[in-house]
Image (cartoon, rainbow, N blue to C red):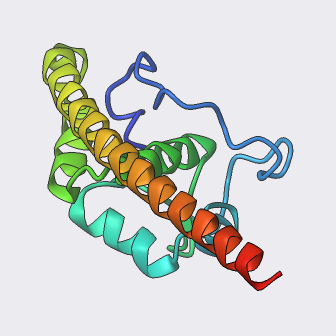
């Protein structure tokens, strides 16, 4: 059972489209090695996500082998995006817990994502300042290089 299936609702469908072109058409059951190939995550990371509660309730085959669904892949796509925001793992686990708890946690999820968005905006502003600095330095060296080249000719 996936994180989404534990709530009985699909209202929070991870907010991201499926990774088109990367999954076999018509397939909805993947081994851990297939998920590694699709997501770029390691098997160790997938097992760790399961162990910490970020990816609970992964179905198993009759032989005990993990079986991931398209919903699980969608969830992993969301987790990847949350990682890119710099969200701490503890907050990602809290978000997953809130999703499993159901619709009555929308407010908490909203606040968690809103705070993360503010962090991303602050980081973007820092990066923009850094880019402006780099552009000035690059311009300085480009101008200095042209001046040196014209002195030599």
Quadrant of the image containing the N terminus? top left
At 34% from the left edge and 34% from the top edge, which residue is drawn?
Answer: 6
Displayed quadrant of residue 51:
bottom left
What's the residue at 24%, 23% (across, down)? 102
79 sits left or right of 91 in the view: right
Labels in figure, total: 0
Does residue 40 show up? Answer: no
Quick check: 53 above or below 151? above
Residue furthest bottom in the image: 152
Percent position of residue 100, x then y:
26, 34
Position of residue 7 measured from the top left corner of the image (x, y, whole percent): 32, 27
Q: Residue 38, located in which quarter of the rendered image?
A: bottom right
Q: Is residue 63 visible?
A: yes
Relative to residue 87, is residue 148 depicted above or below?
A: below
**Which percent across, then down, holds residue 110?**
22, 20
Residue at coordinates 53% horizontally, 70% vertically from top-left? 41
Q: Which of 60 and 25 is in front in this view?
A: 25
Quadrant in which the C terminus appears: bottom right
Q: Which of 131 and 112 is in front in this view?
A: 131
Taking 127 as reference, is 30 left or right?
A: right
Residue 33 coordinates in the image, percent (x, y): 64, 75
């Amino acid at each position: 059972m996936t994180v989404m299936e534990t709530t009985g609702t699909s209202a929070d469908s991870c907010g991201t489209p499926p990774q088109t072109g990367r999954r076999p058409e018509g397939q909805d059951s993947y081994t851990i090695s297939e998920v590694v190939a699709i997501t770029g995550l390691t098997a160790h990371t997938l097992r760790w996500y399961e162990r910490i509660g970020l990816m609970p309730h992964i179905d198993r085959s009759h032989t005990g082998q993990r079986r991931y669904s398209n919903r699980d892949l969608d969830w992993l796509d969301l987790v990847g995006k949350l990682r890119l925001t710099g969200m701490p793992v503890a907050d990602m686990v809290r978000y997953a817990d809130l999703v499993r708890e159901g619709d009555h946690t929308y407010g908490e999820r909203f606040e968690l994502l809103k705070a993360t968005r503010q962090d991303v905006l602050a980081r973007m502003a820092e990066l923009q300042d850094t880019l402006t600095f780099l552009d000035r330095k690059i311009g300085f060296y480009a101008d200095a290089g042209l001046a040196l080249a014209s002195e030599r000719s």
